[in-house]
Image (tube, rainbow, N blue to C red):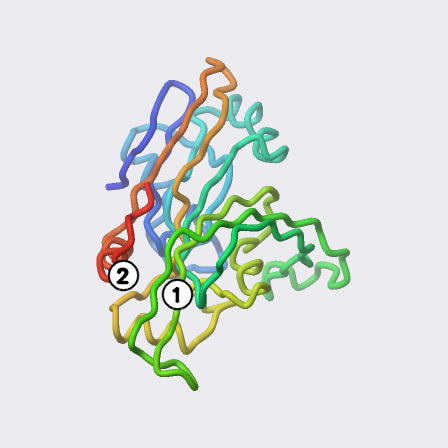
Amino acid sequence: MLEIIYQDEYFVAVNKPAGMLVHRSWLDKRETQFVMQTLRDQIGQHVFPLHRLDRPTSGVLIFALSSEVASQVMPMFANHEMEKTYHAIVRGWIEEQGRLDYALKVELDKIADKHASQDKEAQEAITDYKPLAKVEIPYSTGKFPTTRYCLMEMQPLTGRKHQLRRHMAHLRHPIVGDTTHGDGKHNKLFRDVFDSHRLLLHSSSLKFVHPFTQQEIVIKASVDQTWQRLCTEFGWVIPE
């Protein structure tokens, strides 16, 4: 059962678990559980995705309840009228909030995009980020006897593939648990010491003006047990 965190006659939103694909994909034929099919069976009607979350990312995922609503609302995502807030645990300490304006080249999939052009121009990518808390733990991942981590809040102002993961890696503060753009030493430490086997990136909230009622809607998704354990361990307030 998926946790439904918002529903009206137009939309339904769930708190997507980490590791679950949004919809069926021929890129992973062995997978049997998908958010779309599970939610459809759960509420007894078809759902239409309005955006996507990477498989390892958890948090707010919203669907339209009809294709007509989906076609009307998709431009709101395309025009970034939906304000998304994420939380992540990253390597090292970031002392000040900032805005990263760093263009990203299109990431091509080896299988799905094997015929696509490899030399596309980099696309504009902008992320606001703010450190919320930090910790220094008595475990070494290199030349120092301790290792530092930071709890980050991030808002992507554009919607590029893996934008937050790539932007944090560009700042030399990769997100813990990122096996593509991250640092294996830190991922291993979190697996071995904290029993954390996931990407520590969570879509915490989605804010937008409802296109049919004109009310401001804020949908929030709570963090999972892995996040809760880590926040307790580090003395951090769990992001809400």
Residue at figure coordinates x 69%, y 55% from the top left: 103
Mark 2 = which residue?
234
The residue carrying mark 1 is 149
66 versus 139 height, above or below: above
The one of 30 and 145 positioned closer to us in this rendering = 145
* Residue 108 appears anywhere in the view: yes
Looking at the rendered structure, the secondary structure element under dot 1 is strand
Where's residue 99, x and y in %? 60, 49
In the rendered structure, which disc, 2 or 1, sits on the residue that comes first in sequence? 1
Residue ranking furthest to the front: 95
Give residue 31's position: percent from left, percent from top: 37, 57
Pick the quarter of the image with the N terminus.
Answer: top left
Which amino acid is tagged 2?
Answer: Phe
Q: Residues within 10 Å of mark 1 (few under 14, many from 20)?
A: many
Task: From the viewer's perspective, tell me whether residue 113 is left or right of residue 138.
Answer: right
Please give the name of the residue rendered at 41% of the width and 39% of the height, measured from the top-left corner: 61
Residue 125 drawn at (x, y percent): 65, 50
